[in-house]
Image (cartoon, grey):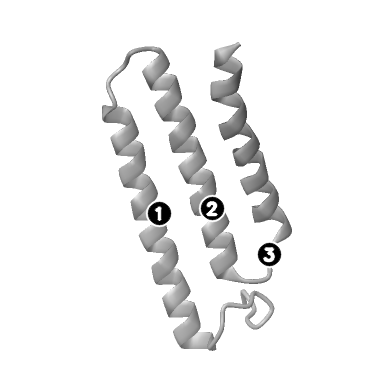
Protein backbone atom coordinates (compact mmCIF):
# COMPACT_ATOMS: atom_id res chain seq x y z
CA UNK A 1 0.00 0.00 0.00
CA UNK A 2 2.78 2.42 0.88
CA UNK A 3 4.47 1.75 -2.49
CA UNK A 4 1.39 2.99 -4.32
CA UNK A 5 1.52 6.21 -2.33
CA UNK A 6 5.19 6.70 -3.20
CA UNK A 7 4.57 6.33 -6.92
CA UNK A 8 1.17 7.99 -7.28
CA UNK A 9 2.16 11.59 -6.50
CA UNK A 10 5.14 11.77 -8.91
CA UNK A 11 3.14 10.05 -11.66
CA UNK A 12 0.21 12.45 -11.29
CA UNK A 13 2.55 15.45 -11.27
CA UNK A 14 4.40 14.06 -14.32
CA UNK A 15 1.13 13.71 -16.24
CA UNK A 16 0.12 17.24 -15.23
CA UNK A 17 3.48 18.52 -16.47
CA UNK A 18 2.98 16.77 -19.80
CA UNK A 19 -0.51 18.26 -20.06
CA UNK A 20 0.86 21.76 -19.39
CA UNK A 21 3.59 21.23 -21.98
CA UNK A 22 1.14 20.12 -24.66
CA UNK A 23 -1.59 22.66 -23.94
CA UNK A 24 0.50 25.80 -23.42
CA UNK A 25 2.37 26.43 -26.66
CA UNK A 26 2.17 30.21 -26.91
CA UNK A 27 5.32 31.32 -25.07
CA UNK A 28 8.72 29.67 -25.06
CA UNK A 29 9.28 30.48 -21.38
CA UNK A 30 6.17 28.61 -20.24
CA UNK A 31 7.17 25.60 -22.33
CA UNK A 32 10.66 25.64 -20.82
CA UNK A 33 9.19 25.82 -17.31
CA UNK A 34 6.94 22.84 -17.97
CA UNK A 35 9.89 20.89 -19.41
CA UNK A 36 11.90 21.63 -16.28
CA UNK A 37 8.97 20.46 -14.16
CA UNK A 38 8.85 17.20 -16.16
CA UNK A 39 12.59 16.69 -15.66
CA UNK A 40 12.20 17.37 -11.94
CA UNK A 41 9.44 14.77 -11.65
CA UNK A 42 11.54 12.24 -13.57
CA UNK A 43 14.38 12.92 -11.14
CA UNK A 44 12.00 12.41 -8.22
CA UNK A 45 10.77 9.08 -9.64
CA UNK A 46 14.36 7.97 -10.32
CA UNK A 47 15.35 8.90 -6.77
CA UNK A 48 12.46 6.89 -5.30
CA UNK A 49 13.29 3.91 -7.52
CA UNK A 50 16.98 3.95 -6.60
CA UNK A 51 16.18 4.28 -2.89
CA UNK A 52 13.77 1.35 -3.04
CA UNK A 53 16.47 -0.87 -4.55
CA UNK A 54 19.14 0.45 -2.15
CA UNK A 55 21.35 1.70 -4.96
CA UNK A 56 23.69 4.63 -4.68
CA UNK A 57 22.61 8.05 -5.88
CA UNK A 58 25.46 8.49 -8.39
CA UNK A 59 23.20 7.98 -11.41
CA UNK A 60 20.61 10.40 -10.06
CA UNK A 61 23.32 13.06 -9.69
CA UNK A 62 24.33 12.46 -13.31
CA UNK A 63 20.69 12.84 -14.34
CA UNK A 64 20.41 16.06 -12.34
CA UNK A 65 23.57 17.40 -13.99
CA UNK A 66 22.18 16.77 -17.47
CA UNK A 67 18.88 18.36 -16.41
CA UNK A 68 20.73 21.51 -15.36
CA UNK A 69 22.60 21.58 -18.68
CA UNK A 70 19.28 21.25 -20.50
CA UNK A 71 17.87 24.17 -18.54
CA UNK A 72 20.89 26.36 -19.28
CA UNK A 73 20.64 25.55 -22.98
CA UNK A 74 16.92 26.40 -23.00
CA UNK A 75 17.54 29.73 -21.30
CA UNK A 76 20.28 30.61 -23.78
CA UNK A 77 17.92 29.86 -26.65
CA UNK A 78 15.27 32.03 -24.97
CA UNK A 79 17.70 34.95 -24.55
CA UNK A 80 18.90 34.76 -28.15
CA UNK A 81 15.30 34.55 -29.40
CA UNK A 82 14.28 37.61 -27.39
CA UNK A 83 17.31 39.53 -28.65
CA UNK A 84 16.60 38.74 -32.30
CA UNK A 85 12.77 38.84 -32.36
CA UNK A 86 11.91 41.01 -29.36
CA UNK A 87 9.55 38.53 -27.67
CA UNK A 88 9.08 34.83 -27.02
CA UNK A 89 5.90 34.22 -29.02
CA UNK A 90 6.06 31.27 -31.36
CA UNK A 91 3.83 33.01 -33.88
CA UNK A 92 6.22 35.97 -34.32
CA UNK A 93 8.88 34.09 -36.25
CA UNK A 94 8.97 31.44 -38.94
CA UNK A 95 11.24 28.44 -39.12
CA UNK A 96 12.27 29.22 -42.70
Question: Could you tell me residue 96's position as x and y percent?
Answer: 62, 77
* Number of other residues with Cα within 10 Å of mark 1, as a class: few under 14, some 14 to 19, many 20 or more: some
Q: Nearer the viewer, residue 57 or 22?
A: 57
Secondary element under disc 3, as helix, strand or loop, is: loop
Question: Could you tell me residue 58's position as x and y percent?
Answer: 26, 28
Residue located at (62% from left, 27% from top): 8
60 with respect to 4 (left or right): left
- Give residue 35's mark: 2
Secondary element under disc 2, as helix, strand or loop, is: helix
Residue located at (54% from left, 23% from top): 6
The residues tagged by marks 1 and 3 sit, at their Cα atoms, a distance apart of 19 Å
Q: In this view, does 44 lie above or below 82?
A: above
Q: Are marks 1 and 2 in contact (CB under 8 Å)?
A: yes
The residues tagged by marks 3 and 2 sit, at their Cα atoms, a distance apart of 12 Å
Q: Nearer the viewer, residue 32 or 7?
A: 7
- Give residue 25's mark: 3
Q: Which residue lies under the disc numbered 1?
A: 70
Amino acid sequence: MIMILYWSLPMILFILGLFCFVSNRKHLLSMLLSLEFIVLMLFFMLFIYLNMLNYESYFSMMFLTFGVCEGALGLSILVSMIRTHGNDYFQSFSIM
